[in-house]
Structures are given as structure tokens and as C-alpha cells.
Image (cartoon, rainbow, N blue to C red):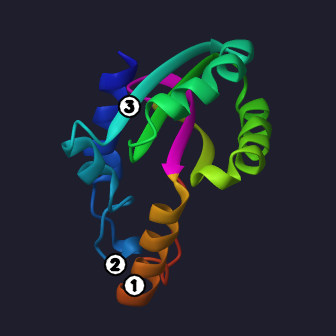
Amino acid sequence: MFEQDVKDWVYNYLNEEVGYRSGMPRCPYAKEVLDDENAYQFHTFNNEGELNRDIGYILGRHHDKRVIICQVIDMNVDTLETISQIYNQYYSGQDKLFIAEQHEINGNTYNLLLIHSRKEMEDAIQYLKENTNFYREKASVK
């Protein structure tokens, strides 16, 4: 259910073209990543202990993935945000960017830890700033 819900969210919400992004999708690269089955990996952790125990192994095993999408079941989003900040410092030399988010998708609430290539994210943001109006219009929060 988790993997399918995230795919539905990407294809039906993040990929939707919106006026406040100058007619571009909410996240212009998310669909591209999911369209390449070798570019991403899903993981579910039951709690903080499992996440802390296994995150180094996951990063090593899937170092070639553009995005690692983790669900942490028994953790509130504030704690996950704190952990993502710690991981961003600890793993800064490994070109990883950790982003904690909570989303309701298909009636289910997910606490997500999204792990991106830091350089790829920075390059994408720079490209969008220099070549599009993506960041020039104010986004409304849903």
C-alpha cells in the first residue's frame, strides 16, 4: 500500500501542472524518477531504532539511487525532522540530502524521510531558478 500510495501521489498530485508554478508540475522531477525503476528505492522502518540501526546500510546498499523513499511508522513528524537535520550533518560528506515530510495520501498518513542526492537537488534548483519562473510565483499550501 505504501509504495502504491506514494506513486499515486507523485503521478496524480506532484506531477499536476499548477498556475503558481508557471504551469509546471508541483515537483518537476518526481515523475521522471519514478518512471525509471532503477532510480529509486522504497523502505519501511517501524520505529526510530530501526531507522537509526539500518540507515547507514541502506545508504551504502543504494548509493546509486537518485531517491530513497522511507516510511517511518511509529514516529511523529517533528522527531523525524530532528533526525533528518542530524543525518544531514552526519552524512554531509556522502552527497545526501534528508527531507522529513508528512503527507496524507489516499486517506493514509505517512511520515516520510526522502533521501536525495544533494548535488542533484542543488543543480535542479539552480536550473529552475535560472531558466524558468518556477520559484518566482508564490506557492499556495495545500
- The span shown in magenta is 105-116
Q: Indicate whether 114 appears above or below 32.
A: above
Q: Residues within 10 Å of mark 3 (few under 14, many from 20)?
A: some
Q: Nearer the viewer, mark 2 or mark 3?
A: 3
Residue 21 lies within the magenta run: no
Q: Nearer the viewer, mark 1 or mark 2?
A: 1
Viewed as shown, does residue 38 lie left or right of 66?
A: left
Which residue was labeled with disc 2? Answer: 22
| Separation of marks 2 and 3 at Cα, in angstroms | 30 Å
| Separation of marks 1 and 2 at Cα, in angstroms | 6 Å
Which residue was labeled with disc 3? Answer: 41
Picture residue at 77% right of the left edge, 50% below the top: 89
Quarter occupied by residue 59: top right
x and y percentages locating residue 23 in the rendered image: 28, 73
In the picture, the disc for residue 133 is 1
The numbered mark, 2 or 3, whose residue comes first in the sequence reads 2
State the residue in front, 133 or 51.
Answer: 51
Q: Residues within 10 Å of mark 2 (few under 14, many from 20)?
A: some
SS majority, magenta = strand
Picture residue at 71% right of the left edge, 22% below the top: 52
x and y percentages locating residue 139 in the rendered image: 51, 68
Picture residue at 35% right of the left edge, 38% below the top: 40
Viewed as shown, does residue 8 lie left or right of 136?
A: left
The N terminus - image quarter: top left
Kindly identify the amino acid type of the residue bearing the numbered disc 1: Asn
Q: Residues within 10 Å of mark 1 (few under 14, many from 20)?
A: some
Q: Indicate whether 78 appears above or below 118.
A: above
